[in-house]
Image (cartoon, rainbow, N blue to C red):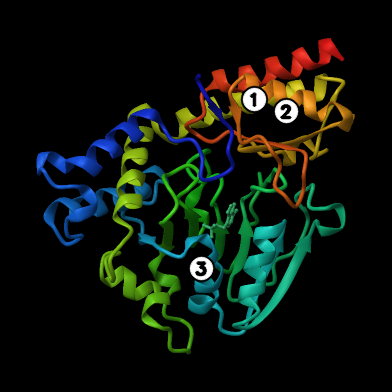
Amino acid sequence: MQKHNFSAGPCILPQSVLQKSAEAVLNFNNSNLSLIEISHRSKDFVEVMENARNLALEHLGLLNKGYQALYLQGGASLQFLMVAYNLLEKKAAYLNTGTWSNNAIKEAKLIGEVVEVATSKNENFNFIPKNYTVPSDADYFHCTSNNTIFGTQMQVFPDTEIPMVCDMSSDIFSRQLDFSKFDLIYAGAQKNMGPSGTTLVVVKENILEKVSRNIPSMLNYKVHINKESMFNTPSVFAVYVSMLTLQWLKDLGGIPKIEKANTTKAQLLYNEIDRNSLFEGFVPNKEDRSKMNATFNLKNETLKATFDEQLKQAGINGLNGHRSVGGYRASMYNALPLESVQILVDVMQHLEKQA
Ligand code: PMP
């Protein structure tokens, strides 16, 4: 039975990428060796790392603009700490839009003072705060572009005099932005890029080496840059799959092309959430709704068992909301076809007719 995978991450990847990855595990580049049993210093793998780094910068329009791309380990969660370790001298400014921002703030507080410029906590993070001021004497400003759990997404990023850092874990490579506005972008690979196990960090080199502390090697961006993202053994499989996914995106026409497809998918689902009398969206402001993760609830919980059974029958996977929020969450990452969203909408309409 065909599955429709709405999982929030790890999540759906392009079939062609999975196929090529499987082949490379058995026989990489016709070497009769597996991708995961050769040296990461071998010519073939060094080429993979180079391509993966270049493709990321190319997609973001940041090639040859003073930025470096790294594939590190420890997830986006380690970046919460690494960002502060490398950039926080006295004080940093954070926008708190949900669980992941909150976790980033928690780690930064271990290193220095944190100013929360705004938060949507009082409304259970169901909107993106606006009209906040970023203090110009902070070392950097940190925000989360897409809030995977609550289903909100930033449309506008402030113009700051200080470096801007963004956790783009759940919407990187999904939409066009002026990425040169950002000085450091990080994203766990396991949404729009690949499997878990590697984290993309794109950093403008001139913001580094400004803090006075000694930074342990593994936490030091500069060390990783100097070693071309090979300071220690990288997660070879995760980097390879990320490279293939970024190549897939390039062949497809890049971010402008995928953004159109993502908009169409999101419109189809949100229109149904708004139209269907049985459902309500979690995020009331339309402009704050995430195109990657649509969160919604059944108005009448007694229909849950029936709806869940119908989802299962339709081959729909991964639609449960995050355990901290409940309800439903449809994650519509780059590789999810429009057809899967249509099937979900059909199930929602069928439920309404029956009710
Ligand atoms: N930030 C965001 C926006 C996320 O969605 C997640 C994970 N879902 C994280 C950070 C944490 O990522 P990781 O599990 O790679 O540490």
Q: Residue at x 54, y 45 (%)?
A: 9
When asked about the image quadrant of residue 21, the answer is top left
Q: Is residue 92 left or right of residue 191?
A: right
Q: Residues within 10 Å of mark 1 (few under 14, many from 20)?
A: some
Give x and y (percent) for residue 45. 19, 53
Q: Amino acid at mark 2?
A: Asp
Answer yes or no: is residue 246 visible.
Answer: yes
The residue that mark 3 highlights is 78
The residue that mark 1 highlights is 312
Does the residue tagged 3 have its C-beta within 8 Å of any atom of ligand 1?
Answer: yes
Of residues 88 and 109, which is closer to you in this image? 109
When asked about the image quadrant of residue 270, the answer is top right
**Eyeballing the image, is 198 above or below 244?**
below
Q: Separation of disc 2 and disc 1 at Cα?
A: 6 Å
Q: Is residue 250 left or right of residue 295?
A: left
Q: Amino acid at mark 1?
A: Lys
The residue that mark 2 highlights is 308
Q: Are marks 2 and 1 in contact (CB under 8 Å)?
A: yes
**Eyeballing the image, is 320 above or below 122?**
above
Of residues 113 and 141, which is closer to you in this image? 113
- Secondary structure of the residue carrying tag 3 is helix
Q: Residues within 10 Å of mark 3 (few under 14, many from 20)?
A: some
- Secondary structure of the residue carrying tag 2 is helix
Q: Residue at x 49, y 34 (%)?
A: 334
Give x and y (percent) for residue 327. 77, 39
Q: Separation of disc 3 and disc 1 at Cα?
A: 35 Å
Q: Earlier in the sequence, mark 3 or mark 2?
A: 3
Q: Amino acid at mark 3?
A: Leu
Q: Is residue 299 left or right of residue 263?
A: right
Answer yes or no: is residue 68 visible.
Answer: no
Q: Residue at x 72, y 38 (%)?
A: 289
Give x and y (percent) for residue 193. 43, 44
